[in-house]
Amino acid sequence: MYYSVRMRAAQGGDHAAGGRHISGAERLVPPGEAAALAGELVERALGHSRGRADFINITVETVAAQAVRLAPIPAVKTVAVADVAAGRVAALEELVRAGVSTAAAQAGMGALAALPDSMRGAMILCAASGSRLDGNGARGVRVSRMDAADGPALLAALRRRGLANDHVREALVLAAKVAAGPGVTAELCWSDDPEYTAGYVASRLGYCRFAHLKEYGCPVGGRVFFAAPGCDVAALVDYLERQPVLATLADWEE
Amino acid sequence: MYYSVRMRAAQGGDHAAGGRHISGAERLVPPGEAAALAGELVERALGHSRGRADFINITVETVAAQAVRLAPIPAVKTVAVADVAAGRVAALEELVRAGVSTAAAQAGMGALAALPDSMRGAMILCAASGSRLDGNGARGVRVSRMDAADGPALLAALRRRGLANDHVREALVLAAKVAAGPGVTAELCWSDDPEYTAGYVASRLGYCRFAHLKEYGCPVGGRVFFAAPGCDVAALVDYLERQPVLATLADWEE
């Protein structure tokens, strides 16, 4: 048995009551780790760089081991870019290489850049037309119930690559789950942490990091998932929100 | 500033999705204690005698110090009763002494005894007619946002009286808040912990414990609040659910 441990934190009250999203976390841990993790996640929510949360919600839920699927963590490459403009051009090219149309890639990039504030979840756009497919508005689709199959091994592998930070670790786990989703073509993301300017494009080609996808100091970030035309959006959303996934390093080469 | 830290745990999924209530907790603590407390409450929910929770929700919310009111913890007396039948007769007499009509006291006792399973919250009954006043059905009214003003002092005071268990400590804090509520005449409670048979009547006369109000092994307990006729039920429910209260020992004599 596993425990899905989820945290969401907001400022100005509950998200449902109009509070501003501050931070979130998604973990899937053995029973013995659930209680300590709940404490850690509250600690983290109280010290987030996006601001001090005044509302934190933690959910702990059992997950049967048989219900958990494995997904490979994509290989990481970093692309050197001089600034945000160059980073976004390079990210757009990577999206197109992954099978997203130029129009859809531009639409996704534009939608993220135009956000008035961070969303709790992601937008799903059609990889051909660029039109929004999920009906979740400003809330988006929140990817939930996932973790690294072996957290210490992932941390060690990232450390060997000079990438041992929380952002990369959590993004890789999420990207692994998303990339294995039914109908997913690619993902585009930059962080809502004002001190973190890097972002990535993940797809069957791997996890491609760009050092600058957002200006330093900007507290607005988000995610776009590009889905193949004709994809079953309801099934994809259900997978993203509910399917427990452990992300494995099985495909990584040292 | 304080943090309201609330826990509710259920079996068979979220309460809102039909899960069976296992346990709950309400605390109001200084900022430095919130994270560790969240961990403790998950730990407690996972080891409750009513069963193993498969769904736990923790909410942490800031409360301005100026919003907190104080309420005196009622003095405790214990009434020796031989068995449940005698305990219920004695509790009924105490309710009547506190100003509840015999019919209403019998109605409240009967409603608790007839519960198919524990409620998350309490029933509010008219202290004169015995009719149900809250419209919350099987959910009831959940008393929230309270704690002992000085937890260690309360524990020490209870220890000197041989009453240092979690049930009494938490019940006294809740009873202090309830008794200070607008329009409250008295409270009747017995625990849903199958291993704990004691219960109490709290009112302006104090907190009167009866060693047996429920058969050993019974996992069904609950609370009835008796409210004066003509009381503003909406204001009372708002107070019970939302007014932050710290319960003080100011009225206790050593």
Image: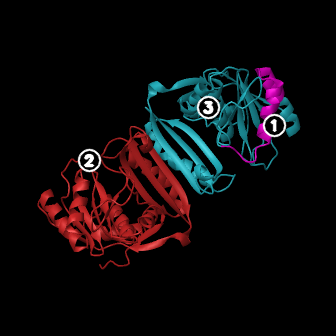
Chain colours: A red, B cyan
> How far apart are the two marked residues, 3 and 1, measured between alpha carbons?
32 Å
Chain under label 1? B
Residue lying at 38% horizontally and 59% vertically, measured from the top left: A134
Quadrant of the rendering where the C terminus of chain A is positioned: bottom left
Residue lying at 71% horizontally and 36% vertically, measured from the top left: B223
The residue carrying mark 1 is B110
Element class at badge 2: loop
Q: Position of residue B154 (x, y in %)?
A: 61, 31
Q: Position of residue B237 (x, y in %)?
A: 60, 30
> How far apart are the two marked residues, 2 and 3, measured between alpha carbons?
44 Å
Question: Residue B253 magenta-drawn?
Answer: no
Q: Is residue B20 left or right of residue B115?
A: left
Q: Which stretch is magenta?
A: B91-119
From the viewer's perspective, is the residue at label 3 or at label 1 nearer? 1
Q: Are marks 2 and 3 on the same chain?
A: no
Which amino acid type corresponds to the residue marked 3 in the rendered image?
Leu
Residue B135 badge: none
Q: Main secondary structure of the magenta part?
A: helix
Element class at badge 1: helix
Q: Examine the rendered structure and indicate whether residue A117 appears above or below residue A222.
A: above
Residue B154 badge: 3
Q: Which of the pair B86/B127 is nearer the observer?
A: B127
Circles 2 and 1: CB atoms closer than 8 Å = no
Q: Examine the rendered structure and indicate whether residue B104 appears above or below residue A184.
A: above
Q: Quadrant of residue A214?
A: bottom left
Chain under label 3? B
Q: Are marks 3 and 1 on the same chain?
A: yes
Q: Is residue B29 left or right of residue A203?
A: right
Which amino acid type corresponds to the residue marked 1 in the rendered image?
Gly
